[in-house]
């Protein structure tokens, strides 16, 4: 079988997933088992993977599934805890003081707060935290998931305290070989690496200037009473103001401070500027926008998780600041756990895993229940129990409700993530073929020639669509992107930068991210509808990133120390 045919064959599982989920609107619980079986067959028959490696990859996927379910559980548990404590009712009250306009609430909760949680945690946590919080504020479940997924864009490259850059790019490139080349020309790895992440920050920051507005416009068009783009556009001055309040400190942090804190700093500065501005009515339109009455919502918008706030009637009302305290604690705990090596080591000391599963080198899986965001969320729940003076039956009710929500997500993810691991681990095979994701990337590169820089972000997005992770996409494809740049004689640093930008955008359409976010609001089975909505901002992101890549490489002739060494 020719390399081209093999590369096309590697695309088949992804195409099938897209056709079933988006085209036929199949629920993921029916589509993903079929895609998993097809992927395993292609791995065994076309890629010449051993049955042992396919099974080992599937088992690795199940371990990762458990980690994701733990995060989902923690996010839902915190929400249900706040529901029973009266915290959610207080948060809703607080937002009416800031602004009753749903567009403003989306910008503050989904964009700014979501960006902060992404910067601190990663792992798809912002969608898992922001989506149920938006539902609690009175948003339709489907709108909440779509908004939560769109946060998986600008902040993601610097999510989890810079993991996609530090681990994804840092370990994805041949550091030893590149360092030797750079040393020969009087430069260093540190200089080259700084160039990569600073270009990531600038590219993201520029594209991200329109993301808050796009979020709002998608919300008003698909979930508004009048299905109007104009009603979203009406808040453009405030949305762009919000974007600048986030992007400027974000870019500055990326250029001057390093890859760990851009998303968190951008979000914190943004919240400090935008919330008082919203209270003052700065740049806000005269008309307040809201959804239609919930009785008029289509059934497909509704999740299975309801916020019956009358359940806490009779309790002493909680202040708004006390209601937000758990989310503030979550942010603080996440930052501490990721930034202080001693704390990180202590939390990671409790772990369960399997190294070299079934004897397959490099196929390993570990769960660190305390270090994962799920563990941090559960710690916050325990603090909230005492902070909000809850009764034990209320906490038990929250745990019971949260546990029941997991069942559907678990079934879908036990097929989705093992499928992903088979694709990623297919590089070890009897025919010495490259892995399926790299084969797909090679096909794209070979097909487009010198304009490949325009498609480089899409290759990064493809990696993230497969893996559900910017970090994994960077690990798989950074070296490939650098090699492609060298063949074309353009900046490798810029090519790797747009790889990371594209991989961040790809998170908006990553199937298991959609499943995880949907699970938190009881919306399983409608993943295809969500993907239809998030395709639009993903296309915007990739076209803009591709345009910036072409302009930088061919228009501005952007260089880097590695080019000088050749």
Image: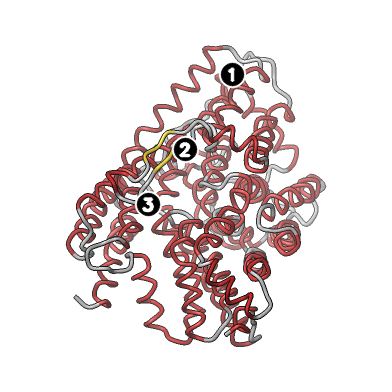
Specify few, some or many for label 3: CA neighbours under 10 Å numbering under 14, 14-19, or 20 or more.
Answer: few
Q: Residue at position x 76%, y 46% from top?
A: 275
Which residue is drawn at the image coordinates 40% and 49% (left, top)?
512
Q: Nearer the viewer, residue 256 or 223?
A: 256
Q: Residue at x 48, y 31 (%)?
A: 306
Locate residue 266: give its quadrant: bottom right
Picture coordinates of residue 185, whole percent (x, y): 65, 81
Depth check: give the residue in front, 84 or 493. 493
Which residue position holds label 2?
520
480 or 317: nearer the eye?
Answer: 480
Q: Is residue 254 left or right of residue 153?
A: right
Locate residue 100: give its quadrant.
Answer: top right
**Closer to the N terminus: mark 3 or mark 1?**
1
Tag 2, which secondary structure? helix
Q: In this rendering, is residue 190 above or below 533?
A: below
Q: Which residue is mark 3?
A: 362
What residue sits right under mark 1 in the picture?
312
Determine whether 87 is above or below 33 in the image.
above
Please provide percent x and percent y for residue 154: 60, 59
């Amino acid at each position: 079988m020719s390399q081209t045919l093999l590369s096309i064959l590697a695309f088949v599982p992804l195409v099938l997933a897209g056709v079933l989920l988006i085209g036929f609107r199949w629920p993921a619980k029916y589509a993903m088992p079929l895609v998993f079986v097809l992927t395993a067959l292609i791995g065994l028959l076309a890629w010449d993977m051993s049955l042992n490696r396919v099974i080992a990859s599937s088992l690795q996927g199940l371990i990762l599934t458990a980690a994701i379910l733990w995060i989902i559980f923690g996010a839902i548990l915190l929400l249900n805890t706040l529901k029973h404590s009266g915290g959610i009712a207080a948060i809703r009250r607080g937002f009416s003081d800031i602004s009753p306009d749903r567009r403003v609430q989306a910008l503050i909760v989904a964009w700014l707060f979501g960006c902060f949680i992404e910067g601190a945690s990663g792992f798809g946590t912002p969608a898992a935290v922001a989506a149920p919080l938006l539902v609690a504020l009175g948003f339709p479940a489907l709108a909440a998931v779509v908004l939560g997924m769109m946060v998986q864009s600008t902040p993601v490259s610097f999510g989890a305290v810079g993991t996609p850059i530090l681990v994804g790019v840092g370990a994805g490139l041949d550091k030893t070989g590149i360092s030797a080349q750079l040393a020969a020309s009087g430069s260093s790895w540190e200089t080259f690496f700084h160039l990569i992440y600073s270009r990531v920050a600038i590219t993201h920051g520029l594209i991200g200037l329109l993301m808050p507005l796009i979020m709002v416009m998608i919300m008003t068009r698909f979930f508004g009473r009048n299905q109007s783009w104009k009603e979203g556009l009406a808040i453009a001055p405030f949305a762009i103001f919000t974007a600048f309040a986030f992007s400027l400190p974000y870019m500055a942090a990326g250029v001057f401070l390093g890859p760990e804190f851009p998303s968190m700093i951008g979000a914190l500065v943004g919240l400090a500027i935008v919330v008082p501005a919203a209270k003052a009515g700065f740049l806000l339109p005269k008309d307040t926008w809201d959804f239609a009455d919930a009785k008029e919502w289509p059934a497909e918008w509704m999740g299975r998780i309801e916020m019956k706030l009358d359940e806490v009637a009779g309790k002493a009302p909680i202040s708004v600041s006390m209601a937000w305290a758990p989310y503030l604690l979550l942010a603080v705990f996440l930052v501490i756990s990721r930034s202080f090596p001693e704390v990180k080591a202590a939390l990671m000391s409790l772990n369960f895993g399997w190294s070299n599963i079934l004897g397959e080198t490099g196929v390993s899986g570990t769960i660190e229940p305390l270090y994962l965001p799920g563990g941090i969320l559960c710690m916050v729940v325990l603090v909230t129990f005492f902070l909000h003076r809850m009764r034990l039956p209320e906490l038990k009710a929250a745990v019971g409700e949260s546990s029941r929500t997991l069942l559907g997500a678990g079934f879908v993810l036990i097929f989705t993530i093992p499928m992903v691991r088979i694709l990623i681990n297919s590089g070890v095979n009897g025919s010495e073929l490259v892995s399926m994701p790299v084969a797909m990337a090679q096909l794209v590169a070979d097909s487009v020639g010198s304009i490949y820089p325009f498609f480089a972000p899409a290759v990064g997005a493809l990696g993230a669509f497969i893996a559900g992770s910017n970090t994994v996409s960077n690990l798989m494809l950074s070296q490939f992107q650098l090699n492609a740049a060298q063949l074309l004689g353009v900046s490798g640093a810029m090519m790797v930068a747009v790889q990371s930008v594209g991989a961040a955008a790809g998170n908006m359409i990553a199937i298991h991210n959609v499943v995880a976010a949907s699970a938190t609001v009881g919306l399983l089975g409608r993943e295809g509808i969500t993907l239809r909505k998030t395709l639009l901002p993903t296309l915007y992101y990739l076209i803009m990133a591709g345009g910036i890549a072409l302009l930088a490489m061919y228009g501005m002739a952007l260089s880097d120390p590695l080019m000088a060494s050749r």
